[in-house]
Image (cartoon, rainbow, N blue to C red):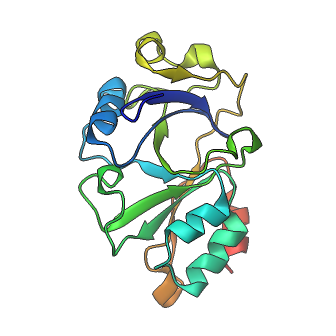
Amino acid sequence: MSVGGVAVFPADTVYGLACDPSTTEAVRRLYALKRRRLDKPSAVMFFDRDLALEGLPELGDRTRTVLARLLPGGVTLLLPNPRRRWPLACGDDPGTLGLRVPALDALAAVRWPVLQSSANRAGEPDARRLEDVPGPIRAAADLVIDGGELPGTASTVVDLRSYEDDGAYEIVREGAVARESVEAALR
């Protein structure tokens, strides 16, 4: 896949789209395939928790401890982004970064981050099977990986932007990881 390419891949929750988070052309293609506005944020996905932590050295100890408990897994974490890393993934809020590290051994050899979003049209159901990914998205992708049927529940989204300072958090969307499990990790 070229630097400007877009891939369809199986995550640990639903099928996703991925591209280079630093390449404007790729991000624009991914958003166009989804019919999603560019001001809407996506997540940056690492396939290895340690690489994610290395890639975000500005995170404090309290936040790092929680990331070690929650990742890898079916969560997307909203983190402070004071260095404005991967602004193309941040939509209209470059001060917030969505981070995802799936529990996915099959792609553990991928040693770089990708911009990631679900492989569906904006507002439509998530894809559990490759055939659930809209045909035009599959046809336009540069790489398509079939991982069989997936659980089909999107990631749980947890806002940790204030967690380092005061322990505050918010579960923005319940999903693949139960609220009780997230709350236990955050205690």
Residue 156 coordinates in the image, percent (x, y): 58, 53
- Write the residue at 72% across / 49% down: 103
**Quarter holding residue 61:** bottom right
- Write the residue at 31% across / 67% down: 84
- Write the residue at 25% across / 41% down: 38
Residue 29 coordinates in the image, percent (x, y): 31, 29
Whether residue 66 is visible here, answered yes or no, is yes
- Is residue 133 placed above or below 24 in the rendered structure? above
Q: Is residue 54 left or right of residue 6?
A: right
Q: In this view, does 93 lie to the left or right of 78?
A: left
Residue extending furthest front? 2
- Is residue 114 placed above or below 32 in the rendered structure? below
Q: In this view, does 125 lie to the left or right of 84?
A: right
Residue 140 coordinates in the image, percent (x, y): 40, 16
Q: Quadrant of the C terminus?
A: bottom right
Whether residue 36 is visible here, answered yes or no, is no
**Quarter holding residue 25:** top left
144 or 151: nearer the viewer: 144
Count all numbered tags in the image, as a single digit.
0
Residue extending furthest bottom? 166
- Write the residue at 56% across / 70% down: 54
Residue 105 coordinates in the image, percent (x, y): 76, 44
